Image (tube, rainbow, N blue to C red):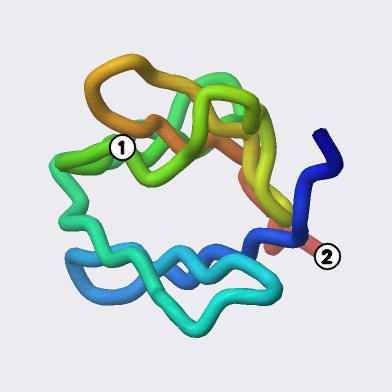
């Protein structure tokens, strides 16, 4: 199955997920954030990914009960 482009917007306490070709936006609350070994992980209060999806634009996704979004932490040092 061909996967469509999925974009993630992280707000103040919430994450919005928008799929290309759909007018619906999925919103989930952020349960927590962890930053370890150069990777930021955000734990959501629900599943926002499909079983066949393992990445969104800029994020890797996993989880069976809730979605965990992970991405490398961007360095701000010059």
Q: Quadrant of the N terminus?
A: top right
Q: Nearer the viewer, residue 31 or 4?
A: 4
Q: Could you say which disc has been placed on residue 73 in the image?
A: none
Q: SS class of the residue under badge 2? A: loop
Q: Could you say which disc has been placed on residue 78 in the image?
A: 2
Q: Is residue 30 above or below residue 64?
A: below
Q: Residue at x 83, y 65 (%)?
A: 78
What is the residue that sits farthest to the bottom in this orientation?
23
Give the left or right position of residue 52, taking residue 1 as reference. Answer: left
Q: Nearer the viewer, residue 55 or 36?
A: 55
What is the residue that sits farthest to the top in this orientation?
64
Number of residues whose C-alpha sits closer than 10 Å to that of mark 2, classed few (under 14), some (14–19) or many (20 or more): few
Q: Residue at x 57, y 20 (%)?
A: 37
Q: Residue at x 65, y 60 (%)?
A: 6
Q: Quadrant of residue 25?
A: bottom left
Q: Could you say which disc has been placed on residue 47 in the image?
A: 1
Residue mark closest to the camera, 2 vs 1: 1
Q: SS class of the residue under badge 1? A: loop
Q: Residue at x 53, y 64 (%)?
A: 8
Number of residues whose C-alpha sits closer than 10 Å to that of mark 1, classed few (under 14), some (14–19) or many (20 or more): some
Expressed as whole percent of the image width and height from the top left, the position of residue 17 reads: 46, 64
Give the left or right position of residue 55, taking residue 22 as reference. Answer: right
Which label's residue is closer to the chain start, 2 or 1?
Answer: 1
Q: Is residue 33 above or below residue 34?
A: below
Q: Quadrant of residue 38?
A: top right
Rounded to the nearest angstrom, the CA distance separating label 2 from label 1 is 37 Å
Q: Are marks 2 and 1 in contact (CB under 8 Å)?
A: no
């Amino acid at each position: 199955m061909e996967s469509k482009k999925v974009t993630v917007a992280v707000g103040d306490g919430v994450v919005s997920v928008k799929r290309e070709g759909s007018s619906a936006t999925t919103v989930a609350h952020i349960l927590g954030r962890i930053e370890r070994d150069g990777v930021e992980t955000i734990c959501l209060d629900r599943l926002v990914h499909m079983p066949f999806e393992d990445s969104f634009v800029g994020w890797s996704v996993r989880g069976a009960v809730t979605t965990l979004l992970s991405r490398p932490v961007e360095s701000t040092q010059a």
